[in-house]
Image (tube, grey):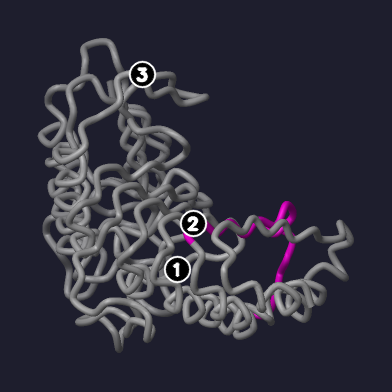
Amino acid sequence: MVLQSISGLRNLKHLDLYMECPVDRHTIASKISTQDTRSFGHLSSLTALTNLQLFCPHYDLCNAEKADREAQQEALAAALRHMPHLASFKCNCFGLRVSDLAALTSLTHVELEDLEPPGPTEQQQPAAPGPAIAVGRPHQLLSLVLSPDPSPRALAHLGAFPRLREVIIWESRRFVSFSFDQADAIPGGSHLLPDTREVVRQAARALADVRARGGVDDNAWHPEYGNEHVLCINDSVYHELLLPPLAELHPPSSTGHAEWLRELGPLAVPGQRVKLGGLALAAGDLAAIADTFPDAKVGRRFQLGVFVCPAAPVRCRRYTAP
């Protein structure tokens, strides 16, 4: 009802919508799904908006059904395409697909709960713009702020935003982080897909291009790492989702994880801290890490939340490389 009540304010330019939720886990999902988010279509009438913020303080508790959540997200994305002047969009409730974000050419600053890769049927083109969005206009996006660990399959499409100058993860301009998810694994298993190397290559180059355009804020500070450069991969993945070496695939790969680890080269920065998690590494994989990051500052340590396995793995042990 909230969104319906403001849908007539067609000259509204700035909207901060704070969607309060009850703390009772059993009622929160139903309230979210049937009240505000089901009405996201009403936002399409607010064509004068330049700034929009949607915030729900307890959305991490809102365990809505997947189909319902996807329908809400699609309704929101469709409404945004009717806002030709929207320059800033902040939302901790939902993410957007890369294709939906690419259709919003007027945006300069975006903060999202998640950035999702294109679906299998939309890999070649972004979502169609709304009737008020100028077709063919170069995308204006300058700054993208994401929650921790976006998918490399999403980051690989950052080339759709040629003016993007910063991708901020974990509130730090010196922090690069991504994690593999179900879209990166063979269905029904925990092995990475054969195209992982190409996906990581594209993601690393896209992030390196962004860094080259915008530089790095020397005063950027992270609560855990201070002002260090950090490259963090799979750190938030539960360790029971252990990704074995690619050499265990059938047909086997002789290079293991090394083939995609070496593609991280464009992101290597002298003195940076490298963290890997949720991976099983063979000796060749460790060699690839050492080759890819040869300029790590002396005295620093690669923090590997991984397991090193022999050629015929029987046991795995925790390992920290000097």
Give the number of the disc on residue 219.
3
Q: In this figure, what is the number of numbered marks?
A: 3
Which range is magenta?
Answer: 50-65
SS label for mark 2: strand
The answer to whether residue 246 is visible is no
Q: Earlier in the sequence, mark 3 or mark 2?
A: 2
Residue 158 screen position, x and y as percent: 24, 59
Residue visible at 65% across and 72% down? Answer: 9
Give the quadrant of residue 200.
bottom left
Q: Check if residue 51 falls in the magenta segment.
A: yes
In the picture shown, does residue 300 fall above or below 49? above
Residue drawn at x 78%, y 77% is 35
| Element at label 3 | loop
Contact between marks 3 and 2 (CB within 8 A): the answer is: no
The relative height of residue 52 versus residue 186 in the rendered view (above or below) is above
The percent coordinates of residue 66 (x first, y second) are 61, 80
- Of the pair 89 and 37, the residue shown nearer to us: 89
Gap between marks 1 and 3, in whole Å? 30 Å
Relative horizontal placement of residue 180, taking residue 54 as reference (left or right): left
Is residue 149 positioned above or below 101 on the image?
above
Kind of residue at badge 1: Leu
User: In the image, which disc is placed on residue 96?
Assistant: 1
The residue nearer to you, when weighing 39 against 198, is 39
